[in-house]
Image: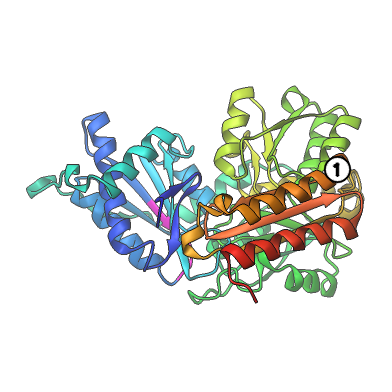
Amino acid sequence: MTKLFNPDGASGRAITEFSTETAMLIGRALASLIQNRSGRPAKILVGRDTRLSGEILTASFAAGCCSAGADAHILGIIPTPAVSYLTEKYCADAGVSITSSRNTFEFNGIKIFDRRGYALSREAISEIERLVTKCPEEISCADGDGIGAISYEKNAEWDYVRALMKKTDADLNRIRIAVDCANGAACGTAEKFFRGIGASVTIINNEPDGKNINLSCGVCDLEPLKKCVAENRCHAGIALDGDGGRCVIIDEKGQPLDGDRIIAVLAYYMKANQTLNANTCVVAQNANLGFFRWAKENGIVVATSQSAGSRHIVERMLVGDYNLGGSPTGHIVLSDCAKTADGHIAAAKVLEIIAKSGRKMSELASVYEPYPQVALNVELRPEFAGRWQEVPAIDEMVKFCSQKLEGDGRVFVRESSTSPTLRIIAEGRDRETVWQYAHAIAKTVADNAGYPE
């Protein structure tokens, strides 16, 4: 791994890239950093998703914490946003989630939250990376009665679910939904929560085996959910990702609402009810161009985050004291309810609108129409991870396509923060044109920095 941490955490192939040794050193470095600043032993929460490697990486991380004198409190399998919430509730010094979000089981990693439940500061992350990758000898180990202990928080899941239920107030007794848990961390929480707020729930892909997380299910593949919505005549379907942070919603006709549409629905109704702070929402730079046009027409101000991902969105929201933000991929942040993206609460707030308005999901989604968009992923060869911009052929093709679309569309190319994958988006008024440009860039990347077919 050329760089240990990306903006949302550390990630790589388990166990060859993101190894047990790496997890242990991160645990030891985090504990040492907290204790050096506070002058007392740290309390650190550890949750995980359902990946095969999750249990041993959790054990390794906890061992690192305890070897540096911190106490590790194991939460078990639980969504990443639950770790954020419980870190503050349990008065912990930090919380971590062992996860690789929507990637397949071969990948794993770690996300770290501070004592308030926000993503750990960039300065702290940089110091942990320095200690782990360059100066591990600077991390002191405890001995004797200074060694930390491991304990288990048996009520963590229900504490999180009860907190979610307190943040919703609509009567969902007449609402039928389907929920795809992606065989991930939400398998234990989604059904409890959505049934708890009154909805009639059909659950799918909630039988994890360690290898089927995000496999042809959840936000990565909406077909199983579309079928379930149709068969059960649901008002809506909710697709989550492996760590429960993202959601995509399916309307009663089987059409998907990505993050941009979800934000549009929420912003429209929050503005009408005077609950949208400063009439402003925060979106990622890769939000659909049609969203910006729609927002302007409806008197909604749009602020853009530096990049995609929960960290950047939350940071921009905090600067302006905004309470709604998100990205096209389904990271939705409602800061009145959570301090990071939470698929459970985002979906619940949309269901509230259905219940209170009496309108169908498809009617709510029709408030805005996106520009045609083509999104492609190209896996990078390891030597080009973080360096694909240096390839002249790729740079030239991206610039060429961007210039051709200027005024009627755009090209957006970025590397995934959780895997060696280049995400390519082209959008504009003409679908055929953006299809051609997106595939031209993808082929250039595959030929020069990926795996050509």
Q: Nearer the viewer, residue 63 or 88?
A: 63
* Amino acid at circle 1: Gly
Vertical placement of 271 versus 244: above or below?
A: above
Colouring convention used in this rendered image of the protein: rainbow
Counting from the top left corner in percent of width and height, residue 230 is at: 85, 71
Counting from the top left corner in percent of width and height, residue 369 is at: 90, 47
Q: Nearer the viewer, residue 134 or 394?
A: 394
Q: Quadrant of residue 450?
A: bottom right
**Which span is picked out in magenta?**
46-51
Seen at 62% across and 50% down, the residue is: 414
Q: Quadrant of residue 257?
A: bottom right
Seen at 45% across and 44% down, the residue is: 86
Is residue 219 visible to us here? no
Residue at the disc numbered 1: 290
Q: Nearer the viewer, residue 176 or 221?
A: 221
Vertical placement of 278 versus 232: above or below?
A: above
**Element on which disc 1 rests:** helix
Q: Quadrant of the C terminus?
A: bottom right
Q: Is residue 350 left or right of residue 448?
A: right
Seen at 57% across and 65% down, the residue is: 187
Specify whether residue 199 is painted magenta.
no
Could you tell me how many numbered marks the image carries? 1
Is residue 392 visible to us here? yes
Which residue is farthest left?
144
Vertical placement of 283 versus 204: above or below?
A: above
Seen at 55% across and 70% down, the residue is: 213
Q: Is residue 240 left or right of residue 104?
A: right
Counting from the top left corner in percent of width and height, residue 149 is at: 22, 52
Counting from the top left corner in percent of width and height, residue 165 is at: 62, 47
Q: Quadrant of residue 320?
A: top right
